[in-house]
Amino acid sequence: MRQTENIVHKRYIYHRKYRRRKSRLRRLARRLFPVSAFLFAAIVCMAAFLQSGDKPVDHSTADVPASNESIQNSPPQSESDPSIASKPIAAGTWKLLLVNPWNPLPEDYTVWTVTLQNGLQVDERCYPDLQAMMDACRADGLNPVICSAYRTREVQESLYQQEVGRYLDEGYGQDAAEAEAGTSVALPGTSEHQLGLAVDIVDIDHQILDESQENTEVQKWLMAHSWEYGFILRYPTGKSEITGIIYEPWHYRYVGREDAKQIHALGVCLEEYLAD
């Protein structure tokens, strides 16, 4: 009888220790669960971030959408505060807004953009004519590529500082480096790219931004026909002292079809046209 009682007692002790151990494990699991869940979520987020990192745009295939169905509307972007939409510029005047080293962009300027297939953006008001121009150029057997379009002030600042740094590395002083940089990369707030109405277009077989671009078939076509679609070669040769920017046979600015026709016929730059 005593032996049976000993066996029962041992089993009772064993089960009590088991229950206590099981209880401790449960409490430990409850404590560790939030930590493990957090670590798991962090690992998942990190994997997603690495997988969706910035990828270079393949300009050989990405360009203006083939149809309006590909357009993505973007919210207004104010240069002073992207979250605040300013009052629109008077109808008709937005196309001829002069932005250069002496005429900075209005602080409350707002841009409504559409996103192209290559991720670049333009003012939605110039998109239909831009599309028509690109389609017509391709219809003539050419391959134009838009390599730059709308830029935020932050992007323009970064580009400008890079150009200043390049001149500093060449031995220029700070003031001289800033002055030289401003002739090819506009000072933030004075760039037409911040308007959303300017695009840099190159030939797919010659994607170099220098004067050699003028010899490509794409540029020859654009110089002859861009005005028909409301665009002008914004920084033509021989006009640098007036525009403040070097000759850029790739930079086109939308001014509307009527004004583009007159500017082309007169052979003047935008500054000269607006001064008349």
Image (cartoon, rainbow, N blue to C red):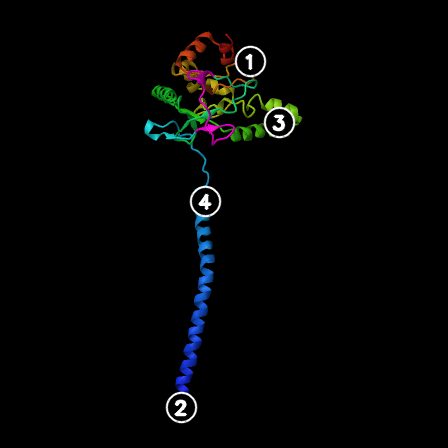
- Residue drawn 62% across the image and 22% down it: 179
Residue at mark 2 = 3
User: Of marks 1 and 3, which one's residue comes earlier in the chain?
Assistant: 3
Per the model, the C-alpha gap separating discs 2 and 3 is: 98 Å
Per the model, the C-alpha gap separating discs 2 and 1 is: 113 Å
Mark 2 Cα shell of 10 Å, populated few (<14), some (14-19), many (≥20): few
Per the model, the C-alpha gap separating discs 1 and 3 is: 23 Å
Mark 4 Cα shell of 10 Å, populated few (<14), some (14-19), many (≥20): few
User: Of marks 2 and 3, which one's residue comes earlier in the chain?
Assistant: 2
- Residue drawn 43% across the image and 66% down it: 26
User: Could you tell me residue 249's position as x and y percent?
Assistant: 48, 18
Q: Which disc is residue 49 wearing?
A: 4
Give amino acid for label 3.
Tyr
Residue at mark 3 = 167
Segment tinted magenta in the rendering: 76-96
Give amino acid for label 2.
Gln
Per the model, the C-alpha gap separating discs 4 and 1 is: 47 Å
Give amino acid for label 4.
Phe
Is label 4 in contact with label 1 (beta carbons under 8 Å)? Answer: no
The image quadrant that residue 188 belongs to is top right
Query: Which element carries disc 2, helix, strand or loop?
Result: helix
User: Could you tell me residue 169's position as x and y percent?
Assistant: 63, 30
Per the model, the C-alpha gap separating discs 3 and 4 is: 36 Å
Q: Is residue 169 magenta?
A: no
Give amino acid for label 1.
Ile
From this viewpoint, is residue 223 visible? yes
